[in-house]
Image (cartoon, rainbow, N blue to C red):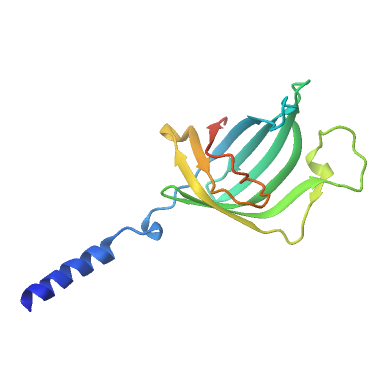
């Protein structure tokens, strides 16, 4: 009986001492990180640049830029705002606003000023959970989201994507 009690005590202490995600400290990023990729048509018609700006307060701004193949001009096409958390490698992001071109206004080209973009949905709420692996001294990270069948802003089954710190 004494051995059984000792074994149960040992198992209970092991079970309750395992690290949980909530036990990990929250990591705050600060700065601007970029990911660049070619459009997924053949031949590529533009470069797509996703710029994520993180603040230590837990806010994130995501700007989507395109650079047409025949120019070097980077054009803002949309942006999102929200919050993020990072515990270990578990990255959670909640986007609470999305802005894009006003479909009722005829705008020439694909370049827009931020004040020409309007809120695309009201209220807007989209949640993402993925894996974020920081590089050395936080100068880059590898971001991976699980594949989702429906169209998503940030998760379209591209696999791991590298973001480099630009400032």
Q: In screen coordinates, is 66 left or right of 140?
A: right
Q: In screen coordinates, is 118 left or right of 13?
A: right
Which quarter of the rendered picture does the C terminus lie within? top right
**Front in this rendered view, residue 158 or 131:** 158
Residue pictured at 52% horizontal, 41% vertical: 143
Q: Position of residue 27 (x, y in %)?
A: 45, 48
Residue pictured at 73% horizontal, 62% vertical: 123
Q: Residue furthest left?
A: 2
Q: Is residue 45 above or below residue 54?
A: above
**Front in this rendered view, residue 155 or 55:** 155
> Looking at the image, can residue 74 be seen?
no
Q: Position of residue 8 (x, y in %)?
A: 17, 72
Residue pictured at 81% horizontal, 37% vertical: 113
Q: Position of residue 13 (x, y in %)?
A: 21, 66
Which quarter of the rendered picture does the N terminus lie within? bottom left
Q: Position of residue 53 (x, y in %)?
A: 60, 41
> Looking at the image, can residue 166 be seen?
yes
**Front in this rendered view, residue 138 or 121:** 121
Q: Is residue 16 above or below residue 152?
A: below
Residue pictured at 82% horizontal, 34% vertical: 110
């Amino acid at each position: 009986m004494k051995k059984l009690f000792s074994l149960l005590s040992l198992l209970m202490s092991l079970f309750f001492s395992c690290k949980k995600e909530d036990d990990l400290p929250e990591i705050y990023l600060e700065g601007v990180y970029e990911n660049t990729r070619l459009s997924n048509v053949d031949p590529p018609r533009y470069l797509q640049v996703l710029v994520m700006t993180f603040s230590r307060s837990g806010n994130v701004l995501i700007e989507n830029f395109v650079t047409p193949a025949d120019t070097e001009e980077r054009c803002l096409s949309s942006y999102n705002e929200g919050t993020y958390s990072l515990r270990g490698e578990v990255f959670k992001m909640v986007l609470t606003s999305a802005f894009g071109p006003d479909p009722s206004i005829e705008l020439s080209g694909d370049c827009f000023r931020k004040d020409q973009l309007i809120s695309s949905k009201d209220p807007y709420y989209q949640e993402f959970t993925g894996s974020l692996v920081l590089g050395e001294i936080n100068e880059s990270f590898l971001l991976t989201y699980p594949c989702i069948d429906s169209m998503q802003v940030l998760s379209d089954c591209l696999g791991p994507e590298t973001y480099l710190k630009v400032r």
